[in-house]
Image (cartoon, rainbow, N blue to C red):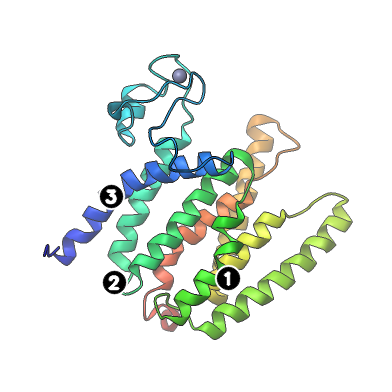
Amino acid sequence: MIVIPNNMLPILLGIFGLLWGSFLNVCAYRLIRDETPWYPIRSYCPNCKQTLSWFDLLPVISYLWLRGICRSCSYKINAIYPCIELLTAVSFYLYAYFVPISYLPTSLIWASALIITIRTDWDDRVILRITSIFLLPLIYLAVYMNILPISLYESVGTSIIVYVLFLVLRAGASYYAKQEALGLGDVELLVAIAATSGVIGTWLTILIASFLGLLHGLLAIYLYKQEKHLIPFGTYLALTNLLIFPLLTLKDFYMNF
Ligand SMILES: [Zn+2]
């Protein structure tokens, strides 16, 4: 039996996060194209379809070494790859550091779903149901089994209220704006966030994500002169929840709030 000292866990999980982030990149890329995440096993260049060798697949390092282009066809590799790998490494380090061990495995699964959403919404403005609302039964089960730090009452209650409230808000806003004002994917992501994070966690996530989304919108208008820019609000919701979730799992978080 291997015993890992507690102070080594964040570093080990951080390193594992780099590799796991690489896998989450593949999941996000393939799920959105209706491909199986694990077939073909080896990754390939989306442009020339050349299978990549292991030294082209080292997280972050290969991207820097190849200066962001494919070795065989010089196709520009999406900079989101190393970003997702780094983000996964940093968040896994933080989770291992802050989250109590009994909640850690479930919290890391939730973090992985959020990271896939960050990428699919950023790339294609799509939020997959399999990483949002379809997780609800599993989340409720985890809450019931006491491996997520929230009561079943708060989890179910908050998710139902958020679903109804945001469907009404969405309908009202879309009616006045005469176009879709809030994506259904965003609402479904919020429902899953509500089920894992409760009232205060959801409220904080919406507050910070709205600020980041507003900043994104202003930058798009002023820097790129884009007047009709679709803000990846789901990316900001998922990113915010990913980073504040470890704090929500702390025992005295609500007392200090
Ligand atoms: Zn290529």
- Does the rendering let one see residue 88? yes
Distance of mark 2 from mark 3, alpha carbons? 17 Å
Q: How many neighbours does mark 2 have within 10 angstroms: few (below 14), some (14-19), or many (20 or more)?
A: some
Q: How many neighbours does mark 1 have within 10 angstroms: few (below 14), some (14-19), or many (20 or more)?
A: many
**In the rendered structure, which disc, 1 or 3, sits on the residue that comes first in sequence?**
3
The reply to whether discs 2 and 1 touch (Cβ–Cβ < 8 Å) is: no
- Tell me which residue sits at (37%, 25%) in the image: 52
- Does the rendering let one see residue 196? no
Distance of mark 2 from mark 1, alpha carbons? 22 Å
Give residue 190's position: percent from left, percent from top.
61, 64
- Tell me which residue sits at (45%, 62%) in the image: 110
Q: What kind of residue is marked 2?
A: Ile
Q: Quadrant of residue 142?
A: bottom left
Give the label on residue 111, or none.
Answer: none
Q: List the residue tagged with mark 1.
A: 194
The answer to whether residue 208 is left or right of residue 104 is: right
Depth order, front residue of 82/203:
82
* SS label for mark 3: helix
Question: Quick check: 157 above or below 53?
Answer: below
The answer to whether residue 54 is left or right of residue 119 is: left
Q: List the residue tagged with mark 2.
A: 101
Depth order, front residue of 150/178:
150
- Tell me which residue sits at (43%, 58%) in the image: 111
Give residue 176's position: percent from left, percent from top.
88, 57
**CB at mark 3 closer than 8 A to ligand 1?**
no
Q: What kind of residue is marked 1?
A: Ala
Q: What kind of residue is marked 3?
A: Phe
Q: Quadrant of residue 42?
A: top left
Q: List the residue tagged with mark 3.
A: 16
**In the rendered structure, which disc, 2 or 3, sits on the residue that comes first in sequence?**
3
Determine the residue located farthest toward the front in the rendered image: 39
